[in-house]
RNA sequence: GCCCGGGUGGCGGAACGGCAGACGCGGCGGUCUCAAAAACCGCUGGGGGAAACCCCAUGAGGGUUCGAUUCCCUCCCCGGGCACCA
């Protein structure tokens, strides 16, 4: 008899596995591959319950896949560049590199202590020059393909992080994703990756991802924001009101309302604004609006709570559909960075234009009427404009009939309507407009004004302009002697930025911005396939063998950010001929958060349950099994100490069972009794658990997978309680003990290994064994008990032999006492027999 | 406003259209013990009944079906994403 002691067995097997290279893999064309990937962590130093959950899920999937005969790649690495290292360095006076590498060591030790089955030979650390040089190489390839651009535009600036941010990194109501400060808009020259070139494909290929949660796909589709619009060209008039050659194009989703356009709007930031008004009587009023708009914070503006303000420019444009001249106003609710920054205003059909028209006394001609609108009878049939005002309290944006709309009058209007198509076609024929597609997705701003990142490999030459660093000069090494505590960045470091132009050899300045860390995490999963390669970014053959990743596991917070960027990188690398697949991650599992009393665990809140403490008490196996048992993986879970205690009890129970059975086997006692019902019940329970546990792991229902193992243990205890020692079926018990050990192996790798090798005396590792075979015939019982319903309610139970013919079942069911009670005095209209399931009697 | 999720015992959660609540936590009662811990056994949705059993119950209301937590429609509530997006 031995006692379950995780503290002695867990470290022992961890060392043994590592010594034996148990989790080291190479390509093997003869076996099916499986790439199980978890989002690599930022090395913050300590592991938290979110890590435990994320990486345990991956580990169970990986171990189960191995037992099912797959050649499994299960790597780990560190997303090691980023701001926290700089902030910590400023605080502690150490170097970001020192801080980062030390954290990687402690975190790796914690991961080893959890018993995760990583191939440690493939570790990737994004702050290693051996890694980031290939990030720079990819950047140069993007540049060659015209996907890199340095340009000036209004960008998001985080005052706290002192750097610019990509659109995706501004979350909620205009705050920085990392520090939650309110983001400011600044006009700056920055580096962009042209992700918008792939907008349509990024959207379309979501359909190629049936293994992704709907939620994530919906979020990406929302973010990409495709809308089918019409472009309409308005002709600008000069100050005297005469049409010029200049046209201003607007986007609209409602070309059917074009006849209701009674004014025209420009965003305050629109470049035309100052040209139109400079030196005119309208200049000061317009300047005021521009100044006011500049002061509005992005938060205020995003909430749409501001009262709309505007000013007339003194100019007009010609509405192409009816030749009408409408006034051009500047309005603060028109956004420069959506569409063209110019809008045709249709106050009767758009609530914002409606408010604006009311405020400034502009006309509101109705053009689309609801089917029950009283104006319908008054305006029906009139093609010409007869009414310029409505008494409505709001604009009407629904479907309806067109009135006073020229030749389109009486057509059906609305989104995706007859009138909409007709107007667009009419404009197209005359070269005044066209159907078009608009995306909300913006190009990815990747430059950061921070030190601890991957340097952008570019040189500014006064003669040649922007020059890429030649490939053979890579990597542009991040210098280690920058004094971060003094607030220095690369821009303060002449030794770094003073250089010569690769093209002309003249004096030039090296780019001092670094890349967004999300560029590093957009291709690390490819590097895992060929981590040590120092001659190329990776060997396409190796990537071709392992990719795409069969299963990706990580937090929902990357639903857009990392997952969108990685999809983009994959598509570009494919177009470069380095990959043959369209999507990097075939299946995605987004795990829920680990909370305490409903609140997110955080150090600042002081409500953190430290994994180390739990390991110290119950061992890593109990923690692993518990965090999977408490809830399905995609749901948030609330931490419970009692639940962990319960898992500890179960592991002890399972341990004792295997230990006791092994003891009895050694004693050689017990004789199998043929046809013993208790033994066949245990036999059935065993195979039911084998089937359910495997199926449930395959569909990531780890909680029910574990509960099926618990049922097996309960069944074995029942058997041993009910059957005297001398009458127990020894081979069956032994089979239960070994299969139980195998079923638990993915969840509790250390305990299973100890039971397998020490208690059950096996030679090879339990983690090199096959998943136990399920025998469907074992589930077939001689007799079955069927519930019998009368009018949908269970009234009795019927025990019959499994192969009883239907008419015998019907007869026996109708003869059951409680069935007779409920059918007495009524006519049996129908009897439904669902074989092996139930009997349903219909009376009336 | 648009788009996704989700509402089941005291709690976490189970249920290919087929006995609602598996498994676990917690609670109650018991065995063992001088006692406690551990372990083991039993009970544990609500109501009625001595019992056999009966009634109610998966956010609300309809529908399809012999049969609905599950499928369809309408609505309510909670969580998340997008949004002065033209």
Image: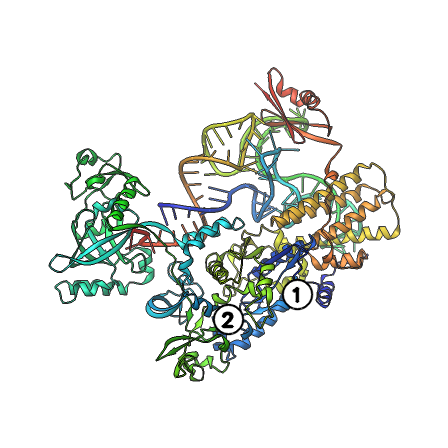
In the rendered structure, find residue A113 and report the number of the disc placed on it: 1
Q: In the picture shown, does residue A79 fall above or below B27?
A: below
Residue A815 in view (yes/no): yes
Colouring used for the render = rainbow
A354 left or right, relative to A591: left
Q: Is residue A833 above or below residue B69?
A: above
Local SS, label 2: loop
Q: Residue A378 at what x, y percent from top left?
A: 17, 34
Mark 2 and mark 1 lie on one chain; the one further toward the N terminus is 2
Mark linked to residue A81: 2
Residue depicted at x 49% and y 63%: A576
Q: Quadrant of the N terminus of chain A?
A: bottom right
For this rendering, which residue is in front, A361 or A91?
A: A361
Residue A478 horizontal side relative to residue A72, left or right: left
What is the quadrant of residue A245 in the picture? bottom left
Residue nearer the viewer, A293 or A410: A410
Tag in front: 2 or 1 = 2
Rendering coords of residue A60 (x, y %): 64, 55
Mark pair 2, 1: CA separation: 25 Å
Quadrant hosting residue B49: top right
Examine the rendering and report whether any part of residue A309 can be seen.
no
Q: Chain letter of disc 2?
A: A
């Amino acid at each position: 008899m031995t006692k379950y002691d995780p503290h002695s067995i867990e470290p022992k097997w961890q060392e043994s596995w590592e010594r034996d290279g148990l989790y080291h893999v190479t390509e093997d064309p003869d076996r099916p591959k499986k790439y199980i990937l978890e989002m690599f962590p930022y090395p913050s130093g300590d592991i938290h319950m979110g890590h435990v959950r994320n990486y345990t899920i991956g580990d169970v999937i990986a171990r189960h896949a191995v037992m099912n005969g797959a050649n499994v790649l299960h790597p780990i690495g560190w997303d090691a560049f980023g701001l926290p290292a700089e902030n910590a360095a400023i605080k502690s006076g150490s170097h970001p590199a020192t801080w980062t590498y030390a954290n990687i060591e402690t975190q790796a030790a914690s991961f080893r202590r959890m018993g995760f089955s990583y191939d440690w030979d493939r570790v990737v650390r994004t702050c290693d020059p051996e890694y980031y040089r290939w990030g720079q190489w990819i950047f140069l390839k993007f540049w060659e393909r015209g996907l890199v651009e340095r340009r000036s535009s209004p960008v998001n600036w985080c005052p706290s992080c002192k750097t610019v941010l990509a659109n995706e990194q501004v979350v909620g109501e205009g705050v920085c994703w990392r520090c939650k400060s309110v983001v400011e808009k600044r006009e700056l020259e920055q580096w962009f990756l042209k992700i918008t070139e792939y907008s349509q494909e990024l959207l379309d290929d979501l359909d190629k991802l049936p293994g992704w949660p709907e939620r994530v796909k919906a979020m990406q589709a929302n973010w990409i924001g495709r809308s089918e619009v019409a472009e309409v060209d308005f002709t600008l008039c000069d100050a005297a009101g005469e049409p010029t050659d200049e046209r201003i194009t607007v986007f609209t989703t409602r070309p059917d309302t074009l006849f209701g356009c009674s004014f025209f709007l420009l965003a305050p930031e629109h470049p035309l604004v100052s040209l139109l008004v400079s030196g005119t009587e309208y200049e000061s009023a317009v300047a005021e609006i521009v100044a006011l708009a500049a002061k509005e914070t992005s938060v205020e503006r995003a909430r749409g709570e501001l009262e709309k303000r505007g000013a007339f420019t003194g100019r007009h444009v010609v509405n192409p559909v009816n030749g009408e001249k409408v006034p051009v106003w500047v309005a603060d609710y028109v956004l420069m960075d959506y569409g063209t920054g110019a809008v045709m205003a249709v106050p009767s059909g758009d609530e914002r234009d409606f408010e604006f028209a009311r405020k400034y006394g502009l006309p509101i001609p109705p053009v689309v009427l609801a089917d029950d609108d009283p104006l319908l009878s008054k305006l029906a049939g009139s093609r010409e404009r007869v009414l310029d005002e409505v008494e409505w309290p709001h604009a009407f944006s629904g479907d309806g009939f067109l009135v006073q709309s020229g030749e389109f009058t009486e057509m059906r209007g609305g989104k995706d309507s007859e009138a909409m198509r007709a107007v667009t076609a009419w404009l197209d024929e005359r070269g005044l407009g066209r159907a078009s597609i608009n995306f909300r997705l913006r190009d990815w701003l990747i430059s950061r004004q921070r030190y601890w990142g991957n340097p952008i490999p570019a040189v500014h030459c006064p003669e040649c302009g922007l020059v890429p660093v030649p490939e053979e000069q890579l990597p542009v090494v991040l210098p280690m002697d920058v004094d971060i505590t003094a607030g220095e960045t690369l821009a303060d470091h002449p030794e770094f930025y003073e250089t010569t132009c690769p093209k002309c050899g003249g004096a030039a300045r090296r780019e001092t911005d670094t890349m967004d860390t999300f560029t590093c995490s957009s291709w690390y999963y490819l590097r895992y396939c060929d981590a040590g390669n120092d001659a190329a970014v990776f060997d396409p053959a190796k990537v071709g063998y392992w990719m795409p990743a069969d299963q990706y596991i990580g937090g929902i917070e990357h639903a857009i950010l990392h997952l969108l960027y990685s999809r983009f990188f994959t598509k570009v690398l494919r177009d470069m001929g380095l990959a043959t697949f369209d999507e990097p991650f075939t299946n995605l599992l987004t795990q829920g958060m680990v909370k305490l009393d409903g609140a997110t665990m955080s150090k600042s809140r002081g409500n953190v349950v430290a994994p180390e403490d739990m390991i110290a008490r119950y061992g890593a196996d109990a923690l692993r099994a518990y965090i999977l048992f408490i809830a399905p993986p995609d749901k948030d879970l609330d931490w419970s100490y009692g639940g962990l205690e319960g898992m500890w009890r179960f592991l002890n129970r399972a341990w004792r069972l295997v230990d006791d059975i092994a003891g009895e086997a050694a004693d050689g006692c017990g004789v199998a009794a043929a046809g013993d019902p208790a033994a066949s019940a245990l036999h059935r329970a065993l195979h039911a658990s084998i089937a359910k546990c495997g199926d449930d792991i395959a569909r990531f229902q780890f909680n029910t997978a574990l509960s099926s193992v618990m049922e097996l243990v309960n069944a074995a205890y029942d058997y041993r309680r009910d059957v005297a020692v001398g009458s127990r079926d020894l081979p069956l018990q032994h089979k239960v003990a070994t299969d139980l050990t195998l079923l638990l192996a993915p969840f509790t790798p250390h305990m299973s290994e100890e039971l397998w090798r020490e208690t059950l005396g096996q030679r090879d590792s339990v983690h090199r064994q096959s998943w136990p075979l399920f025998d469907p015939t074992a589930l077939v019982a001689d007799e079955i008990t069927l519930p019998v319903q009368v009018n949908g309610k269970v009234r009795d139970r019927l025990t019959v032999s499994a192969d009883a013919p239907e008419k015998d079942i019907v007869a026996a069911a109708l003869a059951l006492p409680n069935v007779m009670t409920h059918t007495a005095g009524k006519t049996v209209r129908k009897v439904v027999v669902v074989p092996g399931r139930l009997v349903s009697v219909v009376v009336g």
